[in-house]
Image (spheres, rainbow, N blue to C red):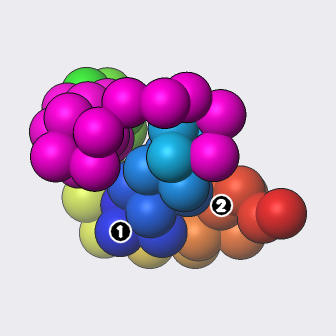
């Protein structure tokens, strides 16, 4: 999630004229929402399935 937050923050900084503190808060809020969307379903699985979901999300992380 840290990389996703950094990516969102960089996109906001480069594509808008918002001040840095506002960009920081917005990227944190967006990352929080995405983390909750990924985390809540992950809480329902355990064992091997949890490991598979974690590896799948790590492999699908956004890159430039």
Q: Is residue 57 visible?
A: no
For the stretch drawn in magenta, the main secondary structure is helix
Assign a secondary structure to mark 2.
loop
Residue 45 percent coordinates (x, y) = 28, 47
Rendered image quadrant of residue 40 = top left
The residue positioned farthest toward the right in the image shown: 64
Question: In the image, is 20 to the left or to the right of 48?
Answer: left
Nearest the viewer among 58 and 47 is 58
Question: So how many labels did they put on this image?
Answer: 2
Assign the C terminus to one quadrant of the image.
bottom right
- Residue at the image point whose x is 37% and y is 30% from the top: 18
Residue 35 percent coordinates (x, y) = 28, 42
In the rendered image, residue 3 lying in the magenta stretch gets the answer no
Please determine whether, in this image, residue 44 is positioned above or below residue 14: above
Please determine whether, in this image, residue 4 is positioned above or below residue 18: below
> Which residues fall within the magenta stretch?
14-31
Nearest the viewer among 41 and 58 is 58
Question: In the image, is 60 to the left or to the right of 21?
Answer: right
- Disc 1 vs disc 2: which is toward the camera? 1
- Residue at the image point whose x is 29% and y is 39% from the top: 19
Please determine whether, in this image, residue 29 is positioned above or below residue 50: above
Residue 47 percent coordinates (x, y) = 31, 69
Q: Is residue 62 visible?
A: yes
Identify the residue position indicated by label 1 in the image.
2
- How far is disc 1 from disc 2 in space, using C-alphas? 10 Å
Numbered label attached to residue 25: none
Identify the residue position indicated by label 2 in the image.
61
Rendered image quadrant of residue 43 = top left
């Amino acid at each position: 999630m840290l990389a996703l937050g950094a990516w969102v923050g960089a996109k906001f900084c480069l594509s808008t004229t918002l001040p840095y503190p506002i960009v920081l808060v917005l990227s944190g809020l967006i990352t929080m929402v995405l983390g909750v969307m990924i985390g809540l379903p992950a809480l329902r699985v355990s064992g091997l399935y949890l490991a598979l979901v974690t590896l799948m999300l790590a492999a699908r992380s956004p890159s430039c």
